[in-house]
Image: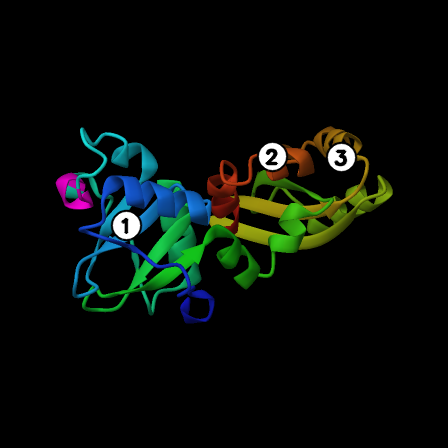
């Protein structure tokens, strides 16, 4: 559940807030998108700075842009995987949380979700991830571990996603010899379908979040 990671310290924009004031608030908070609510705190959608800049007069209220709000949210009682799915598919930095009556409650962020899964430190530290595609019969987990360890690597976390006869093995590996490990696995005919390296993940954190969701989500 997501109740434990909801942030309530970031105030949403009001539907009658002017465009210029909304941009100023975003600048102060160092964000480019915020939820919008009405007088009754009903959630109306998300607006970003690019949409606000479309106003002919930045002194106009956000109400003028109401049809362009992005109605993306998650209910308070939802599972974390559902939050990860919505964030990744819609490239959101923050996801609004509402109750069953669509009253705005707060926000959850990408980093909050990763920390809830206890993988944020692994994802942002000196490690890398590989995804091995196989069938149920064509891999030996003990052999994969041996290959990695023989090439000065350590498996820190492991996920196995099974879809029909297809299997995806997702491994977070700690090693300074990434390329050597990948080549060794390929020599044993293990297909590396994806890999995420430390520098790429840090430099493109939000861009890679969708890929992260895909290999974490069963």
Image mark for residue 72: 1
In percent of width and height, residue 216 lies at: 52, 51
In the structure shown, which secondary structural element does the residue marked by tag 1 occupy? loop
Using the image, tell me which numbered label, if any, was put on residue 178: 3
Secondary structure under the numbered disc 3 in the rendered image: helix
Q: Describe residue 146's horizontal placement relative to residue 63 as left or right.
A: right
Residue under numbered circle 2: 203
- Above or below for 36 versus 200: below
Q: Position of residue 209 (x, y in %)?
A: 50, 43
Specify the segment rendered in magenta: 61-65
Characterize the local packing of mark 1: few (<14), some (14-19) or many (20 or more) Cα atoms within 10 angstroms: some
Q: If you read the primary sequence from the N terminus, does the residue marked by circle 1 or circle 3 appear first?
A: 1
Residues at marks 3 and 2, CA–CA distance in whole angstroms: 18 Å
Corner quadrant of residue 190: top right
Q: Where is 122 relative to 204, above or below? A: below
Q: Residue at x 84, y 39 (%)?
A: 151
Q: Nearer the viewer, mark 1 or mark 3?
A: 1
Find out whether the residues at labels 3 and 2 contact each other: C-beta distance under 8 Å: no
Query: Measured along the vertical axis of the image, is residue 193 above or below residue 75?
Result: above
SS assignment at label 2: helix
Q: Is residue 105 visible?
A: yes
Please provide percent x and percent y for residue 137: 59, 45
Q: Is residue 116 left or right of residue 126?
A: left
Pointer 2 local density, CA inside 10 Å: few below 14, some 14–19, many at least 20:
few
């Amino acid at each position: 559940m997501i109740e434990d990671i909801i942030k309530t310290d970031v105030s949403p924009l009001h539907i009658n807030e002017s465009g210029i004031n909304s941009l100023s608030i975003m600048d102060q908070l160092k964000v480019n998108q915020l939820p919008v609510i009405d007088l009754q705190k009903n959630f109306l959608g998300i607006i970003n700075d690019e949409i606000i800049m479309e106003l002919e007069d930045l002194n106009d209220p956000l109400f003028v842009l109401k049809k362009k709000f992005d109605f993306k949210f998650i209910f308070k009682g939802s599972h974390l995987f559902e939050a990860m799915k919505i964030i990744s598919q819609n490239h959101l930095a923050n996801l609004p949380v509402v109750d069953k009556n669509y009253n705005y409650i707060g926000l959850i962020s990408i980093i909050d979700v990763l920390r809830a899964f206890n993988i944020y430190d692994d994802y942002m530290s000196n490690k890398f991830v590989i995804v091995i595609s196989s069938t149920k019969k064509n891999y030996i987990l003990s052999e994969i571990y041996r290959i990695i360890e023989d090439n000065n690597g350590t498996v820190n976390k492991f996920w196995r996603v099974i879809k029909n006869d297809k299997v995806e093995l997702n491994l977070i590996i700690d090693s300074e010899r990434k390329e050597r490990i990948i080549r060794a696995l390929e020599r044993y005919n293990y297909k590396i379908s994806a890999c995420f390296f430390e520098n790429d993940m840090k430099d493109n954190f939000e861009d890679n979040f969708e890929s992260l969701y895909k290999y974490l989500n069963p």
